[in-house]
């Protein structure tokens, strides 16, 4: 049986980066927080504190591909962010297709009647991070009986 993994998921953006935590034992992920970024550059000390607190075995970064599956400028930036996480913190970084995760997160909030009056009032980035992390966890190989 593969060991249980604790994983941090990141929904990368140029102004905000959603963070979620998940684990492979139950295959669940929960929104954690939203980090501020300046032109896509996070506060690396804040990320270091998150890594120290949660002690993840790996990190997962959402890859915002175009709807036809091709790379975009943002997907290149997200891949660079994933490489930097891997290099700085010596953790395996995985990228996962995140198309529609933000849309799904907004729809989930709307379904819960938590529609924000403006996007800034209720950022969905951490929920989007949880959704993309959930996708990655559900794609992990399961133990065969």
Image: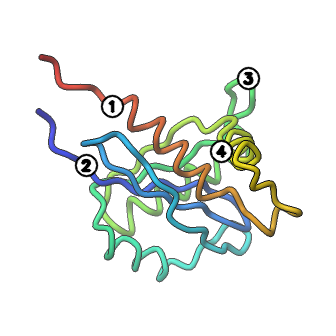
- Give residue 45's position: percent from left, percent from top: 47, 83
Residue visible at 73% across and 23% down in the picture:
68
Q: Nearer the viewer, mark 3 or mark 1?
A: 1
Reading the image, the residue beneath label 1 is 140
The total of numbered circles placed on residues is: 4
Locate residue 80 relative to residue 23 in the image: left or right.
Answer: right
Reading the image, the residue beneath label 4 is 75
Alpha-carbon distance for marks 3 and 2? 31 Å
Reading the image, the residue beneath label 2 is 5
Which colour scheme appears in the figure?
Answer: rainbow
Q: Earlier in the sequence, mark 1 or mark 4?
A: 4
Q: Earlier in the sequence, mark 3 or mark 1?
A: 3
Reading the image, the residue beneath label 3 is 68
Q: In which quarter of the image is the C terminus?
A: top left
Alpha-carbon distance for marks 4 and 2? 25 Å
Q: Residues within 10 Å of mark 2 (few under 14, many from 20)?
A: some
- Give residue 10's position: percent from left, percent from top: 53, 56
């Amino acid at each position: 049986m593969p060991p249980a993994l604790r994983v941090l998921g990141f929904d990368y953006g140029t102004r905000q980066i959603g963070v979620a935590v998940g684990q492979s034992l139950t295959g669940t992920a929960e929104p954690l927080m939203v980090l501020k970024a300046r032109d896509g550059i996070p506060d690396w000390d804040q990320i270091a504190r998150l890594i120290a607190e949660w002690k993840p075995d790996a990190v997962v970064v959402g890859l915002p591909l175009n709807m036809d599956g091709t790379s975009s400028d943002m997907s290149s930036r997200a891949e660079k962010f994933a490489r930097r996480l891997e290099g700085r913190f010596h953790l395996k970084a995985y990228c996962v297709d995140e198309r529609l995760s933000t849309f799904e997160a907004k729809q989930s909030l709307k379904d819960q009647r938590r529609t924000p009056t403006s996007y800034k009032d209720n950022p969905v980035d951490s929920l989007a991070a949880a959704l993309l992390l959930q996708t990655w966890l559900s794609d992990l190989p399961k133990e065969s009986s």
